[in-house]
């Protein structure tokens, strides 16, 4: 797990070499920097918001926005998603006129705030040199890390350098929140994404953040700087770091929807309970030495079970596959050694075959004795793994935050497995003559 001390070490910036080659403005009093903060959007990649820097140089009549949130999808969305999973995230710095930058946020209907940053001429020079260094061809592209190196941490770190480290020094205390808290809150408007990230990310995101680390969030950085003292003296008083606030454009932010776990839990548990009520024993007269179970309602109930099984098999199999492949192949350490692999197995995706049969035929699936026994063993192993998962979490052997999964998902999955175990299959009956 990454400690706060290790995270702090990551904020040290590379030395700027060949400083004398950087062309500086004649008068830094005529250069102004503005913090651009963009509210969260309704896409997967913009639900944390965005930060940029606007640089107005009246010496040269230039006005440009520095944006560290650019990425290339020209190779296709599948390739981009695959690289994202593998941890290959090459983002880059882009520079554009404000009209172009703000026009994009207007099309996306995202609120934008602009605040003037109060810096001394010497601090402006330090920040200007860092931006010029970043614009060099060898420095434009960087390896994006969603918590530790993103569009907001770049601005945070560059401002901290200009301030001589004072911003970081005064934000060493711990926040009461974890990275997982922020992930779930920011994706509350996209419940499937919130649920998926909660499943896929391991215990590395369950430690409390330092206040410094918390500044990876655009609105949190702005909130901190609004009350942070600058080194600029105005009328004998020290000014705040941010001044002249302007709402460039304003739109309604995406609304948080119902807790995803209520939806998932109710959507799986209630139908399972109803199907349990439809269970009935198969009479011994059906040539079976061991009476089994079937579902009352015949075609309808089996098709309902098939629909649920289709969703569960697909979701569980995909989650298990992602966690397994990510553990083996991804550079995202937050996706390794995930205890939720005890609950979601990659092989569960094979259950789609049986789910489709229930959905189409509306009856139990007849299997040979050998196949039936293998499936029962699979369910038994799955249930035992789920029980170990539950007791390990309850007894505190699991550091990962799995409380919501433990309450809303694990019982429903285990109950549905027992239901399918009893009513989903029937062995081929044989008449014995003695």
Image (cartoon, rainbow, N blue to C red):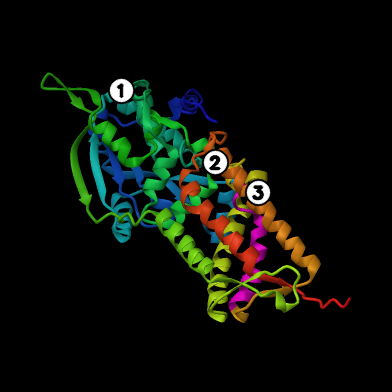
226 or 205, which is in the foreground? 205
Magenta-tinted stretch: 342-359
Q: Which residue, given by chain and number where applicable, does mark 1 sit on?
A: 122
Quarter holding residue 166: top left
- What is the C-alpha distance between the residues marked 1 and 2? 43 Å
The relative height of residue 337 versus residue 303 in the rendered view (above or below) is: above
Question: How many numbered circles does the render carry?
Answer: 3
Measured as percent of width and height from the top left, residue 125 is found at 33, 27
Disc number placed over residue 384 in the picture, else none: 3
128 or 287, which is in the foreground? 287
Quarter holding residue 59: top left
Q: Secondary structure at mark 1?
A: helix
- What is the C-alpha distance between the residues marked 2 and 3? 21 Å
- Residue at 33 percent across and 59 percent down: it is 108
Q: Secondary structure at mark 2?
A: loop
Task: Report whether 104 appears left or right of 367.
Answer: left
- Residue at 53 percent across and 44 percent down: it is 201
> Most extreme residue toward the left, as rendered?
235
Measured as percent of width and height from the top left, residue 135 is found at 45, 39
> Most extreme residue toward the front, as rendered?
434
Q: Residues within 10 Å of mark 2 (few under 14, many from 20)?
A: many
Q: Residues within 10 Å of mark 1 (few under 14, many from 20)?
A: few
300 or 296, which is in the foreground? 296
115 or 6, which is in the foreground? 6
Answer with mark 3 or mark 1, whichever residue precedes in sequence.
Answer: 1
């Amino acid at each position: 797990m990454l400690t706060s001390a290790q995270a702090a070490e990551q904020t040290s910036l590379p030395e700027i070499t060949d400083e004398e080659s950087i062309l500086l403005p004649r008068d830094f009093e005529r250069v102004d920097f503005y913090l651009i903060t963009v509210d969260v959007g309704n896409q997967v990649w913009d639900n944390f918001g965005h930060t940029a820097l606007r640089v107005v140089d009246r010496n040269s009549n230039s006005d440009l926005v520095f944006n560290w949130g650019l990425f290339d999808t020209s190779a296709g969305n599948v390739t981009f998603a695959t690289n994202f999973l593998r941890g290959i995230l090459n983002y880059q710095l882009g520079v554009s006129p404000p009209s172009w930058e703000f026009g994009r946020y207007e099309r996306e209907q995202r609120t934008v705030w602009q605040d003037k940053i109060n810096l001394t001429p010497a601090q402006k020079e330090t920040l200007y040199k860092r931006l010029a260094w970043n614009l060099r061809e060898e420095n434009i592209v960087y390896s994006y890390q969603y918590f530790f190196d993103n569009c907001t941490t770049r601005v945070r770190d560059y401002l901290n350098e200009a301030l001589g480290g004072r911003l970081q020094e005064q934000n060493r205390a711990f926040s009461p929140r974890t990275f997982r808290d922020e992930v779930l809150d920011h994706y509350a408007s996209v419940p499937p994404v919130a649920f998926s990230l909660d499943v896929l990310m391991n215990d590395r995101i369950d430690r409390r953040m330092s206040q410094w680390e918390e500044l990876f969030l655009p609105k949190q950085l702005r909130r901190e700087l609004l009350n942070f003292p600058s080194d600029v003296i105005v009328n004998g008083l020290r000014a705040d770091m941010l001044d002249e606030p302007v709402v460039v454009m304003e739109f309604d932010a995406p609304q948080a929807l119902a807790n995803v776990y209520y939806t998932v839990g109710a959507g799986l548990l209630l139908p399972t309970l109803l199907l349990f009520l439809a269970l009935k024993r198969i009479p011994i007269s059906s040539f079976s030495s061991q009476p089994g179970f079937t579902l009352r309602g015949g075609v309808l109930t089996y098709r309902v079970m098939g629909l649920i099984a289709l969703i569960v098999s697909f979701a569980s199999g995909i989650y298990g596959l992602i966690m397994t492949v990510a553990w083996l192949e991804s550079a995202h350490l937050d996706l390794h050694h995930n205890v939720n692999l005890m609950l979601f197995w990659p092989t569960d995706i094979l259950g789609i075959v049986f789910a489709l049969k229930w959905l189409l035929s509306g009856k139990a699936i007849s299997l040979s004795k050998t196949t039936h026994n293998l499936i029962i063993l699979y369910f038994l192993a799955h249930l035992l793994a789920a029980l170990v998962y539950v007791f390990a979490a309850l007894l505190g052997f699991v550091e990962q935050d799995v409380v919501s999964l433990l309450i809303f998902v694990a019982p429903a999955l285990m109950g549905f497995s027992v239901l399918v175990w009893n009513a989903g299959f029937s062995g081929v009956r044989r008449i014995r003559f003695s």
